[in-house]
Image (cartoon, helix red, strand yellow):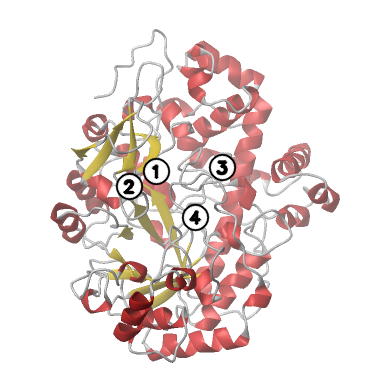
Amino acid sequence: MAASYHHRGAMPLHSTIAPADAGGLADQRAGTPNDGLVSPFTAGNSVLDRRRAGVLLHITSLPGPGANGTLGAEAFRFVDFLSNAGFSVWQTLPINPPHADGSPYQCLSVHAGNPALIDPQWLIERGWLAAGDVQNGNAQRWLNSAFDAFHAAADKDPCHSDYQRFVRDHHWWLDDYALYMAIREECGDDPWTEWPASLRDRWPAALRAALRRLSRSVARYSFGQFVFYSQWKELRRYSLQRGVVLFGDMPIFVAGDSADVWACRHYFDLAENGCPRVVAGVPPDYFSSTGQRWGNPHYDWGAMEADGFKWWCGRLHSQLALYDWVRIDHFRGFEAYWEIPAESETAMEGRWIKAPGERLLETVHRLFEGSGLPLVAEDLGIITPEVEELRDRFGLPGMKILQFAFDSGPSNPYLPHHHPPNCVVYTGTHDNDTTLSWFEALEPEQKAYVYEYLGCPEIPMPWALIRCALASEAWLAMLPMQDILGLGKGYRMNTPGTATGNWQWRFRWDQVTDEITERLQQWIHLYGRRVSPPSGQPAHTTSQAPHPDPAHGLGLPETKQLGVALKQPTGGGLVDQT
């Protein structure tokens, strides 16, 4: 149980839940207002409605001139590549703003988008940024310049009304995020637990003073989210037109130094000073002999359940406004989680604690009124019958990793002859080595066993395993971009348990040959995984899709009220809306 939180005069914590008048989860798949698009990608009791193939590639791994990939022309070109090759799913890693180490699984907010993914050309086209500003500064610096120009022309810019609408629609999380970021910047990027006690503990007078003192910074951070969401909306619209599902990733846990924990301390298991009492991780496993100590605070599940899991409903609300489907990273934490004493240096001294995952998913399921949940369960690691029962009760697809399939004989559950249709098969994930590097590291007898099982010794790696994935009974086959390009050692995205050298890989278009595309087209068709774009929505062929009208409205879906009556936070939020 978390320590009690009764600081004298503390600012009441925001609910950080979706406003009731913004609509429910059941129709989040329909896109956003004025899109004119209806997502056709969910039917029945499972998110998987037919056989499909997709590619796993984070936005940062796209080509381009900057330090990382963005939501600009290269993202639209990648959608074209996917559609032309026969893929109908693009899976990314979390797109929230990371900490300094760049990990998308330890972020400053569960709702905000990463400003580093913003395309500067989009700002230049709207007259908010000069080309020289992009060349002479980092992303945050030129985003600040764009805000200055936008603010100066507020009365004349047709986008200003869209910005105001965005701030109103998203205030239930944006107010706290923007103020948190502004204070964090003022405090030299120190974590909120090290701020002055009055700000750390959200005393009303201190927050009011911070809002006055930092009003421009607060507005600047809100503007950054407006730009991110605008660009993401355009990419999602284009993806739907080309028949490509956007498949997101949602870490089950939240970074301790985040707007979410600062604003909602009562939902987390914390000490009086805001530091975690216990932290998250996993025991020793395939990836680490000492386990993985992630360091995230654990939830106070009692507090969350007491108000009908509104925090989780709000989180899903924002994620399903961005994605068609969402993968729940570390799904097994909904059944039981590994609790590690905060003072422990490794994960070896933890213990399993039961979680109310069944009651949480029952609450979420009611919001969809019997339709399938657009969720995929990452069910890797130490999986018990109880975890499988929880996953299957709600019809959630699990994951099958082919690199895990060849080390324990024919009973290995990752082997394709054990794959149920309602699952997602991967050659490997962002946490695995590339398939070629994995295979080259095997002993000769292991390599022989792999090829004996695959029955295609004439096809080199990684293509032999790619073909195995596409041929699987699994309704969704996902291929990391590194495997499609045939890359070997040194090109993995992440090595679990390490803090440096991760999240940096990017591909180049000259690596994507006609031979690769033609082979993918042939195999995706051969194994019944090609899906045509939705009828009535033209499949554009340009590799540089035009951006929609910048004056086009932006907001949350106009959908019916949530079944659990999520209430709009009172008081209008912290940030002045006018």
Residue at point 29%, 51% (across, down): 331
- Foreground label between 2 and 4: 4
Q: Quadrant of residue 471?
A: bottom left
Q: Which residue is mark 4?
A: 494
Q: Would you call the spot at circle 2 few (<14 residues within 10 Å), some (14-19), or many (20 or more)?
A: some
Mark toward the start of the polypeptide (3 vs 1)? 1
Counting residues from the N terminus, which is met first, the one under dot 4 or under dot 3? 3
Residue linked to disc 2:
561
Q: Say the numbered circle drawn on residue 21.
A: 1
| Quadrant of the rendered image containing residue 49 | bottom left
Mark 2 or mark 1, which has the lower sequence index? 1
Residue 538 shows in this picture: no
Furthest toward the top, the residue is 8
- Residue at image position (28%, 54%) is 381
Q: Nearer the viewer, mark 3 or mark 2?
A: 3
Quarter of the image for residue 283 reads: top left
Give me the C-alpha separation between circle 2 and circle 1.
6 Å
Give the answer, above or below, for where 435 lies relative to 516.
Answer: above
Label of residue 101 in the image: 3
- What kind of element bears circle 4? loop
Mark 2 and mark 1 in contact? Answer it, CB < 8 Å: yes
> Where's residue 444, x and y in %?
38, 77
Near mark 4 (Cα within 10 A), the count class, few <14, some 14-19 or many ≥20, is many
Residue type indicated by callout 2 = Gln
| Real-space Cα separation, disc 3 to disc 1, in angstroms | 37 Å
Residue 214 picture location, percent across and down:
65, 23
